[in-house]
Image: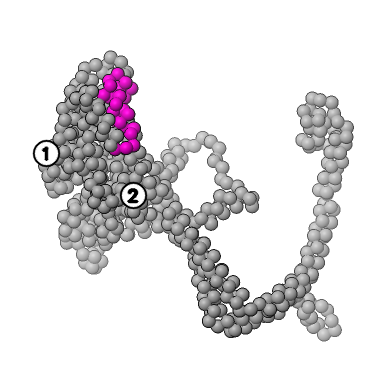
Amino acid sequence: PRPFPVSPALAMADGCGTGREAPCPGAAAALRRWEQLRRRAAAPWARGLLAVAAGLGLFYAALRVPLRLRDGLAAVTVFLSTLTPKFYFALTVTSSFISGLIFVFEWWHFRKYGTSFIEQVSVSHLRPLIGGVENSPPAPAAFSAGENEANRQNMPECKMWRNPLNLFRGAEYSRYMWVTGKEPLTYYDMNLSAQDHQNFFTCDTDALRPSDTVMQKAWRERNPQARIKAAYQALELNNDCATAYVLLAEEEATTIVDAERYFKQALKAGELIYRRSQNCHSQSPQHEAQLRRDTNVLVYVKRRLAMCARKLGRIRESVKMMRDLMKEFPLLSMLNIHENLLEALLELQAYADVQAVLAKYDDISLPKSAAICYTAALLKARAVSERFSPETAFKRGLSTAEINAVEAIHRAVEFNPHVPKYLLEMKSLVLPPEHILKRGDSEAVAYAFFHLQHWKRIEGALHLLHCTWEGTFRMIPYPLEKGHLFYPYPSCTETADRELLPTFHEVSVYPQKELPFFIHFTAGLCSCSAMLALLTHQFPELMVVFAKAVKYIAPKNVGLTLFIPVHDAQIVQV
C-alpha cells in the first residue's frame, strides 16, 4: 500500500488509463512530482508567502496606476482639444440616431412579445458565457399529498376549451369578413376546431362507409370550398350522412335560417344512425366507438339547433331543447351546455331559474368559468345595485347584501380580471373565437360579447361593478404567486390569447407589465444625445468651451494623496 492517499489521476496513470494494463513509469513519476508540489503549495507557510506577494503587488498597483491614468487622460485631453465643433455635432447626432433605433426596436419587441430583446439576449446567451448556470429541474423526491397538491396548484394551466357560444362560420364569421375585410378567426383557432371535428365526427369504422370516408378527408381540408365540395360528394354517396349536413350548416349557410334548415336534416339523419348504433354497440369495440361518434354528432346537432332557436328569438323553445338535452345526456357536462342555458335564461329574465342552475354547477368540485362567476355576481348585484350609492355606503357602511355583492364581484374579477374592462366598455369588443382560454382575454371577450346586454338590463349593476372591481387587486398583490380564492393566475395566458385572438385586437395583459429598464435607458440616451446635438448646432463655440472645461476639470481630480511623515506632519499630494 502507498503511504499517502492517491489522487484519481495518479491511479489512472499507474495503469495507463485502465487500471489493468502495465504501468507507465514516466507518466507515473511526473504525476507524483505534481502531487508533491501541490501538497507543498497547500502548506500554511506557502499560503502566507503568496498573500505577502499579492499585497506587495496591490500596493505597487495603487502607487503606479493613478499616475499612469493621469498621463493617459492628459494625452486624451490634448487630442480632444484639437477637435472642431463639427466633430461634436456629428458625434451627438450619430449617438442620438443609433440610440433612437435601439429604442424603437426595443419598444416594438416589447409590444409584440412582451419582453425586452436586450434582456432576453443577455439571459439566453451572455449569462452562460460569464458563468451563469440555468436552473436544472430538481431531482424526483417523495412528497406528501399536501405538497403534491400545492405544486399542482402552482403550475400554470393553459388548456384550450371549446367556446360554448361559438358563432357560425358561414352565417356570422364570414359575413363579418365580407363587411370589414378583416379575418375574425386565427389559423391556430381554426386548426383547433379541425382537430375537434376529427375527434367528434370520425371513428375507426369510417373506412367501411364511403360517405364517412369522404367526410373524414373533408374535416382535414384547409380550404373551405374544398370542404363544402366534399360534403356534397358525401351526400351523393349517402343522403343520410349527418356530418355532411353539419358541415354545410356551419360553413355554407349564410343565414341562421339556412343553418337551421341544414341542422334539421342532420338531426333526422343523426337520430336514425344513433338508433342503429344503439342496437349493435355491444357486438365489438368498433361498434362502441361508432356509438360514441354517433352520440357526439347527435348532441352537437341538438345543441346547435337550440342556439339557432335562441338567435331567431324563440328563446323558450331554445331553453326547452337545452334542458331536454342535459337530461338525455347528463354525462356530457364537459360540453358546458349549462352556459348556453344560463345565457338564454338571462335573456328571459328568469333569475330564479338562473339561480337554480348556478346552485348545481357553481360547485367547488366543478371547473369554474367566467360565465359561472360573473353570473353569480350579477344576481347578487341585482339585489342591491338599484339603491347603491358609494357616498351613502361610505357614511353608514355596507349592509350584508352589499357585502355579499361586493365579495361576489371580487371573486369574479379574481377568476378573470379582463372582463370588467369589456363590460364597462373601456375596451372594444371583437367577435369571440371558437376556442377560449379560461381566465384569459379570449374568455373575457366571449363572455362580454353575449352577456353585456344582461348587465345593462339590470339598473345600477355596471355602476356597482365600476365602483368595486379594482378593489380586488388589493387582496392579491402578487397574483402570479398566490391567489385569494383561486389558484395563482397563470403566466401563460398572454401568449395563448395572442394565438386565439385576431391581430387587430389589442390583447389585455394581466398583471400589467412594467416597461423594461432598457427602454427607459435608450429613451433617455436618445433624448440627451438629441439635446446635445441641437445645442451643438445652435451654439457651437459655447459647447466647445463647455466640453473643454469638462475635460480640464476631470484630470485635476485624479491624483493620489500620500501621508508622508515630515518635520511638521504635512500632507503631500502627488
Question: Image point 22% across, 27% down: which residue?
Answer: 235
Tag 1 secondary structure: helix
**Mark 1 lies on residue:** 317
Location of residue 75 in the rendering, given as x and y in whole percent from the top left corner:
74, 74
Tag 2 secondary structure: loop
> CA gap, disc 1 to disc 2?
34 Å
Q: Is residue 72 magenta?
A: no
Question: Image point 20% across, 39% down: which residue?
Answer: 253
At label 2, the amino acid type is Pro
Residue 503 vertical placement versus 266 (above, below): below
Location of residue 485 in the rendering, given as x and y in whole percent from the top left corner:
34, 49
Residue 362 vertical placement versus 237 (above, below): below
Q: Is residue 212 magenta?
A: yes
Q: Which mark is residue 456?
A: none
> Is residue 289 or residue 47 the one in the foreground?
289
State the residue lying farthest toward the top: 283
Would residue 314 be seen by someone viewing this image from the given angle?
yes
Q: Which residues are magenta?
A: 199-224
Location of residue 572 in the rendering, given as x and y in whole percent from the top left corner:
79, 80
* Residue 332 horizontal side relative to residue 108, left or right: left
**Mark 2 lies on residue:** 502
* Residue 456 horizontal side relative to residue 27, left or right: left
Colour scheme of the picture:
one colour
- Of the 4 image quadrants, the one containing the N terminus is top right
At label 1, the amino acid type is Glu
* Residue 87 horizontal side relative to residue 195, left or right: right
Of mark 1 and mark 2, the one earlier in the sequence is 1
Near mark 2 (Cα within 10 A), the count class, few <14, some 14-19 or many ≥20, is: many
Question: Image point 23% across, 41% down: which residue?
Answer: 170
